[in-house]
Image (cartoon, rainbow, N blue to C red):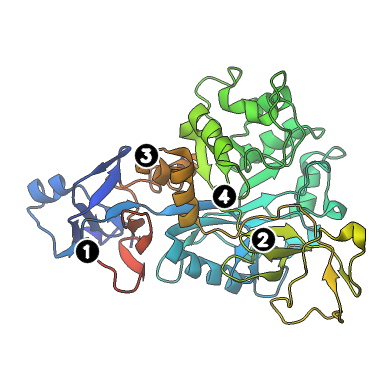
Amino acid sequence: MRGGQGAARAPVLQFTNCRILRGGALLREDLWVRGGRILDPEKLFFEERRVADEQRDCGGRILAPGFIDVQINGGFGVDFSQATEDVGSGVSLVARRILSHGVTSFCPTLVTSPPEVYHKVLPQIPVKSGGPHGAGVLGVHLEGPFISREKRGAHPEAHLRSFEADGFHDVLATYGSLDNVRIVTLAPELGRSREVIQALTARGICVSLGHSVANLRAAEEAVRSGATFITHLFNAMLPFHHRDPGIVGLLTSDQLPPGRSIFYGMIADGTHTNPAALRVAHRAHPQGLVLVTDAVPALGLGNGRHTLGQQEVEVDGLTAYVAGEWVTEAPGPSQAGSRPAPASTPGGPHPSRTWPFCSQGTTTLSGSIAPMDACVRHFLQATGCGVESALEAASLHPAQLLGLEKSKGSLDFGADADFVVLDDTLHVQATYIAGELVWQAEEAGP
């Protein structure tokens, strides 16, 4: 229950002995919750003459808004880009498991896929409120297929598409219904992109620029047309150049519409982005930084082969690469530097496996296997920013990107009581959605 009828009669919870993140600062104040929302205690005292029905001692821990992940491709063996008969059960599994990462809302992300995959999958991922069953679904993020061949990264070239022929009609033909879509990543240099961006934003869909060779002028034009986000800054785009900084230059551009703010995703997993690059981006435009995991289905699993849409990825330690082909003989001298193949895949030995064998792997990064709370900790350490800034990059900023800052991403009065309890090292101790405890670490409280 989030406000509405009956909220005034709901029990009042008072979280005490805590530091709450509010207004960009950690305040030693209590957090009051009723009916799934953050409550103003002054109104409770002076207008209703009420006190708390229950108090919970937080042991001096931090209470921060629940994390929001706007780019997550799957996890725990679930691939959102696989057209199964029961996509919803996979989404539910991931929604439940990421509660332990402090994530209370997310955008399931589909990578470049054939049209039949979108037509089958998208109707099965409706917007859904969070609760004990798992994190809330805010809408789907479609990353591709309208992206650059040169900067496609881990996206399969065979399924890339263009909208130059029929503009927005090509988009509709590819995706089908857009009812459950919240974000679309596209390359702004593609012909008729201005028309497409305007049509998407008119439907309330956030347009993100990524997997692109666009120069700064094309990127600025895309923002003037309505684009508001950059997909995983620095990755899969032209590198910064002093005469034409490309999409990266949007962070400090003076050619954006008045009052228009650009947000940008960062994968702070220790692999995708060098700490120096994290610091450059954060210092250039701290208020636009949005932490994303870009997690692949291998999140939460070990080394081995896993899927990502129409391709296989190979997890080696803390890194996921686009996998190579399975072969039945050892590599020659020219291939001596190739990484060895894993001994098995998640479903057991590869069906074509014989011995000896090796995998001719690539060095193309294919998403991340880092959970959101780990990204927050790495970002804090790498940039030297304040705890408040690191937490807001995973909560307030993605909420602002999606226009949800009145209800998500903050602990302001009236906002949804979605929050995470953290210790001083920013490890998750408990997760709450609508004021209800939905996950708790062993021997942790409240």
Q: Nearer the viewer, residue 102 or 407?
A: 102
Residue that numbered label 2 is attached to: 122
Q: How far across and down, in percent of the image, does residue 426 sit?
A: 37, 54
Residue that numbered label 1 is attached to: 10
Image quarter (top left, top right, bottom left or bottom right) of the C terminus: bottom left
**Quarter assignment of residue 16:** bottom left
Task: Kindly report the distance in space between the C-alpha atoms of the residues bearing marks 4 and 2.
Answer: 32 Å
Instruction: Classify mark 3: residues with Cα within 10 Å, few (<14), some (14-19) or many (20+).
Output: few
> Disc 3 on helix, strand or loop?
loop
Task: Kindly report the distance in space between the C-alpha atoms of the residues bearing marks 3 and 1.
Answer: 36 Å
Give the vertical position of 327 relative to 235 (above or below): below
Question: Which three-letter amino acid code belongs to the residue tagged 4?
Answer: Gly
> Disc 4 on helix, strand or loop?
loop
Q: In the figure, is residue 159 to the left or right of 415?
A: right
Q: Are marks 1 and 2 in contact (CB under 8 Å)?
A: no
Q: In the figure, is residue 87 to the left or right of 400?
A: right
Question: Which three-letter amino acid code belongs to the residue tagged 1?
Answer: Ala
Mark 3 or mark 2, which is nearer to you?
3
Residue that numbered label 3 is attached to: 386
> Disc 1 on helix, strand or loop?
loop
Question: Which three-letter amino acid code belongs to the residue tagged 2?
Answer: Leu
Instruction: Classify mark 4: residues with Cα within 10 Å, few (<14), some (14-19) or many (20+).
Output: some
Q: In the figure, is residue 137 to the left or right of 225?
A: left
Sooner in the amino-acid sequence: mark 3 or mark 4: 4
Q: Nearer the viewer, residue 173 or 396?
A: 396
Residue that numbered label 4 is attached to: 270
Task: Kindly report the distance in space between the C-alpha atoms of the residues bearing marks 4 and 1.
Answer: 44 Å
Q: Are marks 4 and 2 in contact (CB under 8 Å)?
A: no
Sooner in the amino-acid sequence: mark 3 or mark 1: 1
Q: How far across and down, in percent of the image, does residue 87 sit?
A: 64, 70
Question: Which three-letter amino acid code belongs to the residue tagged 3?
Answer: Gly
